[in-house]
Amino acid sequence: MSRIGKIARRTFLFGAVAVTGGAAFGYYKMVETPPNPLTPDTGAALNAYVMIDASGITIVAPRAEMGQGVQTTLAALVAEELDVTLDQITVIHGPPAKAYFNQALLGNAIPVIDYQRKPWVHDAAEFVGNAAKFLNLQVTGGSTSTRDAYVKMRDAGAQARQMLIEAAAKRLNVAATDLRTETGMVIAPDGTSIPYTDLATDAAALPARNVTLRDPSDWKILGTSQPRTDMVAKSTGTATYGVDVRLPDMRFATVKMNPKRSGMRGFDASEALLMDGVEKIIDLGDGVAVVATNTWLAMQAAEAIVFDWEDATYPADTAAQFAVIEQAFDGAPNSTARDEGDVESVPAEITAEYRVPFLAHATMEPMTTTALYTGTALELWSPNQGPILVRDWCAKAVGLEPEQVTVHTTLMGGGFGRRGEYDFAVLAARVAREMPDTPVQVTWSREEDMRHDFYRPAAIARLSGTVQDGKAVMLSADVAAPSCSHQAMERWLGRAMGGPDNELVAGVYDQPYAIPNYRVRGYKADLDVPVGFWRSVGASYGGFFFDSFIDEMAHAAGRDPIEFRLELITPEHAPSAKVLETVRDMSNWNSPLPAGVGRGVAFTYSFGTPVAQVTEVRDTGRGIKIENVWIACDPGVALDPNNIKAQMMGGCIYGLTAAIHGEITHTNGEVDQFNFPDYDGLRMASCPQIEVNVLENAPHISGVGEPGTPPAAPALANALFSLTKQRPRSLPLWRDYSFV
Amino acid sequence: MARTLTINGTAHAVDLPDNVPLLWVLRDALHLTGTKYGCGVAACGACTVHIDGEAVRSCQVALGDVWGAVTTIEGIGTPGSVAVVQQAWIDHQVAQCGYCQSGQIMQAAALLAQNTAPTDDDIDEAMNGNLCRCGTYPRIRAAIHDAAKKLQEA
């Protein structure tokens, strides 16, 4: 315990959260299993993950499906041990509950650089992660879902199977050890078989047993690509997203809130009220809601309202905001997350400053929630990544207790971190309170969504480095940005969080490079522009800063960029070296570059997963085309290779989109971008061919939803340098390069 | 004034003002929610449907201007009986969040109806108006090539 105590005192942000949440409870409470929240009307719940009734088997996969395939992979963990096939089961998200706390999310708080963790650190991380249940952190994020579920959901499947076997043994009057299971049935030596659906009620009355999990070499489902359980519905227009909820007598509404993220002095809705089909205008204090017979009409009416907004509390334009970020370098560092050797003792040879802008999430499905308020209860249908947060904050907003609130977490049309907030649900709850007993769906316009995001922070990095004899001997990086962790924790937990925020310097301090003098300091900018978690968070810019600068150092050393990196990475982390070697071979890196072609490599270790990418660009004469990307990643255990490839591909495209097009700017306190014409993405014609290799050399399972994003920008930037000899040091790239 | 629209072969009476876009008639009045709202300005293609076989952005077609029979994603196949192009989407495991895929599939179906063997350039041109934030383009391309092959064999 003393070692854990020491860690807790030194811990970084999430660790501080863990201590706040966990310290009051002591060891027993920390390891106690929260109660099973499932109370099925028919049949029985064998544990928090398995429900069986006469009609079939339901598996709870308590993480939000926003496209990452998590509902399939988590269900597969249970199915593997339960001995059912994926087409025999129904997968649901289930209710908000402590039982589904995300241990891995808080476990990441341990202030030991991920790739350097020893087994005891992993144990300590697991213990600290227990605090997530006190903080109601049932959150989908941080690429933690498979890491968190890997043991506990297989355990749930194995325990349920054992209970079903014992129930069958009693009924058949044979020894449990003589029974086997297959495709949802318990089978006796004489061939008698009893379907699980007939045994559930008896089995649920039995105690849970300690079980031994199967060896991966015996897996039938895990480790093999599975058809996603949501694929047919998503290919036939029958999947129900948040915006697709339809209830009897439901009204449609939208909101228009202050784009300066401040208060409202007044508004004139006289024109809107005259519009046929507009039923109600609700004053929300810092904006209004319009309720109408259809969503479009509500949006039209909202546009017709004249507002008198209060001014922004943050600097009103982008230049002034960047000035605040720059000023942060003059203050004390928020963290020195890495400090090896003595960087001050080595004169700097290369220096550079990098900048990245704010970014929007721009999920394809705009923010939405449907709510029904009755005076004593609130029911919500909400596409969200944090259902307990949604429940509790909505309860508070309408003056109910959390127990009076039901949350249905629907499929979501993209999340990327945006739906880890709860603002959209609270607004819907407040609208519903003004119209008791009538369900109302509140859907934001694309413009409202784009201009009321919690943005990926803008950031500035100042780097210096030195090479000797072809090797990096010093690297010093200072990064300044507003803290999305501090802001988000304050929103989530309702209290201000201080302390070092390692997300400020993610992708920079935590890279497996044996550079003898290596220091990374974070500077927190005192800037209130609303910021939040965006796919890969700090590593989304940290990866660009760090790897681009490594490329600069390789160039200064006159070395091959992959060899230069490999020399520094190999002694630190062998699986990371292997992904680099793999993309080198996949891309035929050592082949001569044809005229008009540039090739760049990048490597980022994030969320426990090393990822390397090689990007090839060609000058077509009409602009630069990204032709090919080769990706190698290592999540330790490849639970579903085809889905992991999809995540790597998607993560890369998300990163390329941001690198080329993504930029949120402000004028007069308002975001300048409104819709996809001014916040565009990669499209079919601009999308490269992408090839992915999934390796399994890393010692621990890790996530795949985010790690594909950080290397995308630097690999492209390094390819552009190879093509043009101009080093991109700020994003978005369209400002300085012409793409087809 | 009530209008009658033919959608997926069925006549629907719609009592909404003529300026309401077809997208919202489908979604909010008729509860055909497979067709999605993404931008409202014809910039993302999530709302793509067919009118007399032609792919159109339903957010830009006012109810009063609907000139022919409407086909939506629900009309080209069902979970129990999927269209060839939908089967290709399933075989290639295209969808991630899936929100844009109704529009992608309707755009691809219109392309394949006109061009039985689209090249990569044809696919670029036909599909470029359909945005996918999850980044499923490489699998969409593969699924379209595969569907074209299957349709030719059929």
Image: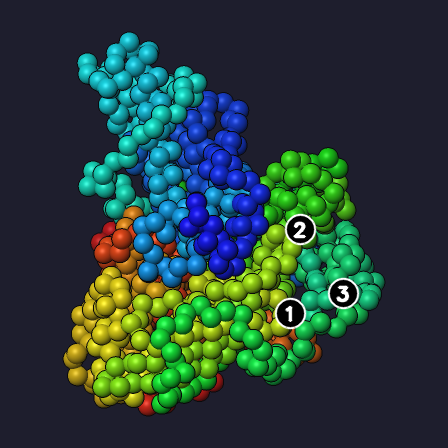
Q: How far apart are marks 1 and 3 (CA)?
A: 15 Å
Residue at image point 30% right, 58% down: A645
Q: Is mark 2 on a helix, strand or loop?
A: helix
Of badges 1 and 2, the one in the foreground is 1
Mark closer to the chain start, 1 or 2 = 2
**Residue B88 numbered mark, or none:** none
The answer to whether marks 3 and 2 sit on the same chain is yes
Q: How crowded is mark 3: few (under 14 residues within 10 Å), some or many (20 or more)?
A: some
Of B28 and A405, the residue lying toward us = A405
Amino acid carrying mark 1 in the image: Asp
Q: Are labels 1 and 2 assigned to the same chain?
A: yes
- Label 1 sits on a secondary structure element that is loop
Mark 2 surroundings within 10 Å by alpha-carbon count, few (fewer than 14), some (14 through 19), many (20 or more) = many
Quadrant of the drawing holding the C terminus of chain A: bottom left
Report which residue position mark 2 lands on. Answer: A426
Percent coordinates x, y for residue A495 in the rendering: 65, 55
Question: Which one is earlier in the sequence, the residue at label 1 or at label 3?
Answer: 3
Pick the front one: B13 or A596: A596
Q: Residue at x 28, y 58 (%)?
A: A634
* Residue holding disc 3: A263
- Quarter-wise, where is residue A514 in the image? bottom left
Q: Which residue is drawn at 33% across and 85% down?
A: A466
Q: Residue furthest top?
A: A173
Q: Where is residue A166 in the image (x, y as percent from the top left)?
A: 32, 18
Q: Nearer the viewer, residue A392 or A333?
A: A333
Q: Give above or below for A173 relative to A305.
A: above
Q: What element carries label 3?
A: loop
In screen coordinates, is A89 left or right of B37? left
